[in-house]
Structures are given as structure tokens and as C-alpha cells.
Amino acid sequence: MGGGLAVRVSQEIAAEAEPVLAELLTDGVPAKLAAKDPTLWGPAAEAESSIRLGWVDTFQRSRALLPQLAALRDELGELDHVVLAGMGGSSLAPEVISLTVGKQLTVLDTTDPGQVAAALRDRLDRTVVVVSSKSGGTVETDSHRRAYWQAFLDAGLSPAEAGRRFVVVTDPGSPLEATAREMGASVILADSDVGGRYSALTAFGLVPTALAGVDVAELLDQAEWFASTLTDDVDNPAFLLGAAMGAAARNGRDKIALVDDGSGITGLGDWAEQLIAESTGKEGKGVLPVVVETPTSAGATGPDVLTATVGGALGVGEIPGSGVVPHVSVNGALGAQFLCWEAATAVAGRVLGINPFDQPNVTESKQNTAKILEEGLPAAAPSFTEGDIVGYGAGGSLEEALRALLDAAGGDGYVAIMAYLDRFADADTAKLRELLAAASGRPVTFGWGPRFLHSTGQYHKGGPQSGAFLQITGEVAEDLPVPGKPYTFGQLQAAQAGGDRQALAGRARPLLHLHLTDRAKGIAQLLDAAARLAPHKEG
């Protein structure tokens, strides 16, 4: 226990982590990390690390934002519906913060035309849009900005009035900064030496949540209290967690199940998923995060799974009512959780011998998407049509295609479900994760596209090539133009799905693409087929 957060590990994992911790201490890693030493991950990573370690103490610099955020909230006054347009690290931390403290924040991290249209219809007269993009060139976020700008003008606002409805968070000198100033938007510049997935306690995490009414100073207080433990040789929760993750992966537990223990933090697994997957999934190595619904859900345990529970208050031991005794439990305040997982992931990167700050494979799907938008989707012949589902990549019935995909994961692989749908209107699709986990006995991840492209997408391409992939797309009932662009949201969504299929196909991984000709009926049909699959039996 340290700094308001406790990390506890089982005896088995403690035994594996002990020599790793001893090595880290011998090498003086705690002090070096606190000093932001870029040499910790080897010569090849030094250039990148030297400009990506600001997260170690960004909570201190972020305090300078507090008066500005208070003044901005007062100035916006009647605009009490906060919409966040952002992807990956720019959206996941704010979503966890708002969910955990019970403040309303509309997170727009999709290109699904139905979901975007629903957001545009929701309280537009009271809406302020936070546009968050570190690079300033994120296609999804730029599309959201264009759609809201046009919606405000169509509602009768002048360009000056529309500009007041935008708050832009970006790095200094990005293309978005110049665009924002032309729009007349409020501009808040973030720490340029913090990568997107490590940015929870920077302007990216704090601006939208402060506007939504969160006391973000409390998060910074929690992180600052916890930061005092990062240099400790004895009581250092982050290093224990990082050593446990790294040692477990080296010993065959290279998947980590992230389980909410129900004790006060909501949705942290989704944020930790993108942090861990994008940081470690490269060079054929990595720790695969698997977000599991409850401690009793299929996939929370397994021979190659490190079971980690997360919460605000629960002590060590069995989770009440579940029968699950985790390998690792992490309990503490949310601000401390952010810093703990960031430090632990950086430490795990050192243990695994990779650079935890780059994302070498993320651009591949983006490039494929751009090409498809220019040239169109390549023609593909269906393998089967059954009810409201058209299948590509496997023959037979829907059940047979699903079973073949699960079998293709083998004894040490995983299954990734990638749903390019509306995560609210088509929310039932997420139930597929547990059904396929129960049927396969393998770790199964679930991601909404294109959201996961900024998260587990790096692991899919750069991590161990042991995944079997299920992509789900759906017919668009009513498309929506992207103002100023020659394509619609529906075309962009289809191009992103197609670009990702190409990236996966180039690695010769098993891939089943299911297209729903009627979304509601197709989802019901798919869940029914998955439920009929014979459950996996151990040994």
C-alpha cells in the first residue's frame, strides 16, 4: 500500500516477479524513471523516450490549467451539454473519469453515421464540443468537428457564435491549432512530451471532464500523493505491478484479464486496455489486455491469463460472490490508478525489451483507409448468406464459420471481435464476447471500430501473431455527409473496416467478416448462433 493505492499479488506471481523486481532495483530503475531517464528502454528507444516521459510529472504542470478551466466553464455558462470528439487516449480517460464520478459527458469516438447523427440531434442548442487530437490530423475527430460546425450553422448560428461552441485541445503547432484559431474556438495546448495513451492527467483528460463538472483538482491531488512512491525500493506499487505483468508474460501468462471488482471505479479496463496493448504489442511480443465484464464472466481466468481486478476499495483475497481469487488486485483512487498503470506499463516494456512509447503499426490501417476512400472497396464474393448475415472468409453455415474461427485461435491464441457498428444502438453486439469466450475457452476481446484501431489495433498487427479475427459491419440505414469532404461517414466507416481487413489479411491471420444486412435482426441471429456453440470443456 502506498500513496493511496494498493497492489497485491498472489504467491505464485510474487515468486515470478521477485527476481525481476530485484533486477529493476539493482539497475536503479525507480530513481531513473522518476528522473525521466530516456535510456531505460535501450538505445533504439532513446530518441522516442526522450520526448515521451512528461507523464511522470504532468500532474504538476496540469495545475496551471485549473484557473483557465474554471473561467472557461463560467464563460460557457448555458452550454451544459459537453460533447468530446476524440479517439483513443484522447477519449478513453475522460470517459472513465466521467463515469466514475457520475458526470455526464457524451463521448464521440466513432464514424458510424447513426451514432454521429444521434449525437448531433441531442441538445444541440446547449452543446459545447471539445475537439481533442494530439496530432491534429485524426480523421475521425476532424470529421466530427466538420459535422458539428455545419450543424451549428444550419441551426442559425453565425460563424462567430459557432466558434464559441468549440474548445480545442491539441499539441502546440499542430494543424488543428491553426484551424481552431481560424474558427474562433478556445484553444488549450497540451503537454507535447506526453504520448496520447499516457495523457490521462494532461489537458486531454482534464478539459472535457472539468467542463462536465468534475473536480479535476482532486485527480491531480491523488496522482501527486501516489507519485511519492515511484522512487521507493520497498513500497512501490507501480513497480510491483509492472514486474508482475512483465514476469508473467515471460512465463507464458501473456494475456491480462482486466476485471472491475465493483468497488467504485467504472470503465478503467477500457482505458488500461489501450495503454497496455498499444505500448507492449510490437516486435512479436506483448501483453494482450482482455476487458472482462464481471469476475464471473468467461475469460476472467485461464492458464495463460493473468487475472487482474481493479477497483477503488476492495482488499486482498477472493472477490465476494465470485469465487475468483485474482493474481493481481489494484485498488485505489482514480488519479493514482492512472499514474500507477502508466508507470507499470513502462516498467513492463523494459522487462519485455520493447519501446513502450511508439506505435509502429498503427499507420498501416490508416494508409489502407485513405487508399480505399480514393479508389473504392475492392470487390469480394460472399462465402455464405444466412438470414440477415452475409459472411466472407469461411464457408458453411454461420455456426460452422464461427466454430472454425474459434478453433483457428489454437491453444495459445486469442479471438478479437471488431464491431464497426453503433455502440449504443447496437450495444447488444458486445454480448458476443462472453459467448465466444465460453465456447472457445480462449481469451476473447471486444472492440468497437474504429475506436479499437487507436487501442488494440497496434497489438493485432505488431504483437504475437496468434489472433483470430471476427469483423462485424452493418448496413447503414441513413448516411451522413462529412462536410467539405467527398465521402460520407458511412463510406469512411466502410473504408476503415476494409483497411483493417487488408492489414490483417496481409499477416495471413484467420479472418471472418460478417455483414449485417439488417442490424437488429442480424445481431439477434449472431448471438443465437454463438449461444448454440458447444461450450469448451477443460482437459
Image (cartoon, rainbow, N blue to C red):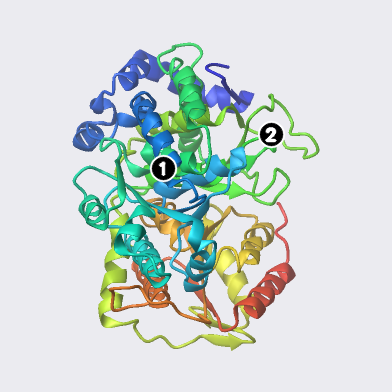
Residue 186 location, x and y as percent?
32, 47
The quarter of the picture where residue 306 lies is top right
Is residue 442 visible in the rendered structure shown here?
yes
Residue 385 location, x and y as percent?
58, 88
Q: Is residue 21 left or right of residue 400?
A: left
The quarter of the picture where residue 161 lies is bottom left
Q: Which mark is residue 75?
A: 1
Residue at the image position 66 percent from the left and 80 percent from the top:
521
Q: Are the two marked residues, 2 and 1, in contact with CB atoms closer than 8 angstroms?
A: no
For label 2, the crowd category at 10 Å Cα-Cα, with few meaning under 14, some 14 to 19 and many 20 or more, is some
468 to 515, vertically: above or below = above
Q: Is residue 174 left or right of residue 468?
A: left
How many marks do you count on the picture? 2
Which of pointers 2 and 1 indicates the residue nearer the eye?
A: 1
Name the residue that disc number 2 marks.
263
390 to 483, vertically: above or below = below
For label 1, the crowd category at 10 Å Cα-Cα, with few meaning under 14, some 14 to 19 and many 20 or more, is few
Residue 439 location, x and y as percent?
68, 62
Indicate the secondary structure of the residue bearing disc 1: helix
Residue at the image position 43 percent from the left and 38 percent from the top:
206
- Between 168 and 296, the residue placed more toward the observer is 168
> Looking at the picture, which amino acid does disc 2 mark?
Ser
Residue at the image position 37 percent from the left and 57 percent from the top:
461
Residue at the image position 26 percent from the left and 50 percent from the top:
135
151 to 258, vertically: above or below = below
Q: Earlier in the sequence, mark 2 or mark 1?
A: 1
Q: Is residue 257 left or right of residue 134?
A: right
The quarter of the picture where residue 520 lies is bottom right
Residue 188 location, x and y as percent?
31, 41
Q: Quadrant of the N terminus?
A: top right
Q: Is residue 436 left or right of residue 140?
A: right
217 to 253, vertically: above or below = above
